[in-house]
Image (cartoon, rainbow, N blue to C red):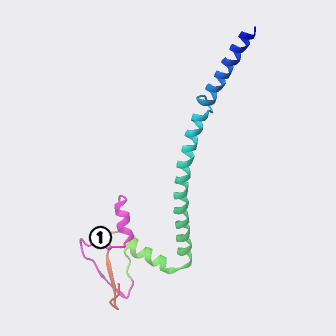
Amino acid sequence: MLKWLAVVLIALLGLLQYSLWLGEGGLRELTHIRARVDTLAAETETLEARNQRLAAEVVDLKNGLDAIEERARSDIGMVRSDEQFFWVPGVEAEDSPVAGREGAGLPPAGVPATPPSVISEEGRP
């Protein structure tokens, strides 16, 4: 009788160990979940940084005219009335946001492939 009890207890212990290591909700699944959490945390940090940049840009657009003017110049090529517009085909501006968007796929609607160079009446860009 004691022999059968020992065999049943050992079998039960083996079943519990299998369940702990390999079964549903076991340690193997826990390591997969932790790896997924780490991946999602890194993605969340990236998205939060992007959201903070966009929020700062929204505040800047609401409060200042400089950001609006910069957007108008870079996105749709607007020129002030006291400036002269010179467009040189085949030459791209170095720090243009338009050039960064071209690399992402399509240029924005209404923007030439090469951003315009603008020089004011005073001779400053």
Residue 42 visible to an observer of this rendering: yes
Please say if 30 is above or below 101.
Answer: above
Check the picture and name the quadrant holding the N terminus: top right
Image vertical order of residue 17 relative to residue 34, above or below: above
Q: Is residue 19 left or right of residue 78?
A: right
| Residue found 71% across the figure and 10% down from its top | 4
Rendered residue at 61%/25% (across/down)? 18
Residue 87 percent across, percent down from the top left: 27, 77
The residue lying toward the viewer, choosing from 25 and 94, is 25
Most foreground residue, 59 or 27: 27
Disc 1 crowd, CA 10 A, few/some/many (<14, 14-19, 20+): some
Q: Is residue 102 left or right of residue 28?
A: left
Residue 110 visible in the current orientation: no
Outermost residue toward the right? 1
Q: Position of residue 11 (x, y in %)?
A: 66, 17
Q: What residue occupies the far top of the structure in this picture?
A: 1
Residue drawn at (26%, 73%), measured in percent from left and top? 91
Q: Quadrant of residue 2?
A: top right
- What's the residue type where badge 1 is placed? Thr
The boundaries of the magenta stretch are 80-105
Question: Mark 1 sits on what residue?
Answer: 114
Relative depth, front residue between 51 and 35 = 35
Residue situated in front as seen by the camera: 105 or 22 = 22
Q: Position of residue 29 (x, y in %)?
A: 58, 35
Q: How many marks?
A: 1
Residue 87 among magenta residues: yes
Query: Magenta stretch containing residue 7, yes or no?
Result: no
Q: Quadrant of the C terminus?
A: bottom left
Decide if residue 2 is on the left or right side of residue 58.
right
Answer with left or right where residue 117 lies relative to residue 43. left
